[in-house]
Amino acid sequence: MTRRRSGSALSITVGVALLVITAVAAVSVGTAQLDFASVWSVLLSRLGIGTSELGGTQAAIVWELRLPRVIGAMVVGAGLALCGAVMQTLMRNPLADPYLLGLSSGAGVGAVVVIVLGVGGGPLVLSLGAFGGALVALLVVLMLAGARGGRLTPTRTILAGVAFAAFASAISALLLVTAAGDAAKRVMLWTFGSLGGLRWDSLGVACVVLAAVTVLVLLHGRTLNSLTFGDRLAGSLGVEVARARWVLLVATAVLTAVLVAICGAIGFVGLVVPHAVAFVTPYDHRLRIPITMIAGALFLTWVDVIARVAFAPREMPIGVMTAIIGVPLFIWLLHRNRRI
């Protein structure tokens, strides 16, 4: 166990270093190519260390456009991977991901309503609409799962989530059909997910919520370890199973809602990344969760880079790219792991 812990600690350290290198490399790549050293100089100058080698326009591209997008990709990737890992343990279902409870569909309905109605207020109102839709989805699913005094079991929760997701998707499709041309385009962009609109002011809430949920999950690390072996064994070890499941479900739901609110629906990150990390880490969630988050951040950042440059000057929706890359990877994981 000591060797595993030291190995996982080394993996986390290497992962953090890779995050820094990836951030600089991803900022360097784009329609306007920038060299590695110049990007470093801009970042250091913003921190008050030295001066920038780039002019005002290029420095603005780095700091105001590309860096928020890269940081946003890391935050969203880490958050979705975290939610996927937690939900797969809580539901004891290897196919669980952040959208299993219908949160993505609920957020989509909220955003579509704001777009179709032409409500003013810009991205803030759109994000609030998506956030509200996701929270409504959570409440409805939990009410359905616990209807008539039923226990909040994984099976009931999954079935309620699938039913609500189908209903919400139908509502979104209906609103899309009735939307005007420009509104329909915005709805489609939201549906497929996009990181292009991320700016510094849209990342603050997501970073705070991600940090809070991460701390909460790590504090429940032993609980998650116990739940891996079933509710009965966890209860015999002193775990309040129902309370723990409610707390962690609500926490991951809130985080998913915040992430969907700023970037739209991005699938497969929460499904594929936890499985990939499980191959190389011990079952202890206090070690597995940080590694999963780092892997999710790296995965989505590089997928976003591919989405930006592969079809330049056009940009492929990030949700499409995660599906194109995630599906073959998940098929490979299914082939390797017969327990799934």
Image (spheres, rainbow, N blue to C red):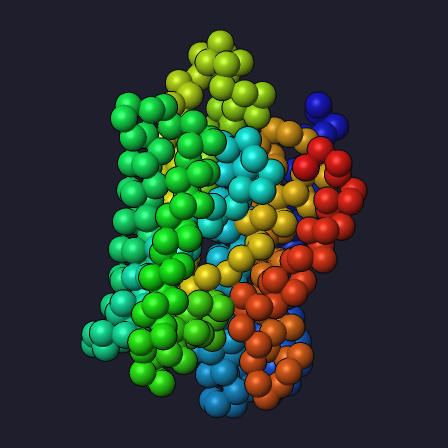
Query: Eyeballing the image, is 49 above or below 223?
Result: below
Query: Eyeballing the image, is 208 above or below 159?
Result: below
131 on left or right of 323: left
Residue sitting at the far right = 336
Query: Eyeballing the image, is 22 above or below 86?
Result: below
Q: Nearer the viewer, residue 43 or 215?
A: 215
* Quadrant containing the C terminus in the rendered view: top right
Q: Which of 339 and 284 is in front in this view?
A: 339
Q: Quadrant of residue 259?
A: bottom left
Horizontal and vertical percent for residue 47?
Answer: 47, 68
Horizontal and vertical percent for residue 97?
Answer: 52, 46
Which residue is located at x 53 percent, y 73 percent? Answer: 317
Q: Nearer the viewer, residue 258 or 220?
A: 258
Which residue is located at x 50 percent, y 83 percent? Answer: 61
Which residue is located at x 68 percent, y 31 percent? Answer: 282
Query: Eyeballing the image, is 221 above or below 308?
Result: above
Which residue is located at x 44 percent, y 67 percent? Answer: 191
Q: Is residue 180 among what the camera can see? A: yes
Horizontal and vertical percent for residue 28?
Answer: 62, 77
Q: Is residue 21 among what the camera can see? A: no
* Quadrant containing the N terminus in the rendered view: top right
Q: Which of 55 and 261 is in front in this view?
A: 261
37 on left or right of 199: right
Residue sitting at the far top = 236
Horizontal and vertical percent for residue 194?
Answer: 47, 70
User: How many numbered marks have been drawn onto this rendered protein structure?
Assistant: 0
Q: Quadrant of residue 262?
A: bottom left
Q: Quadrant of residue 151?
A: top left
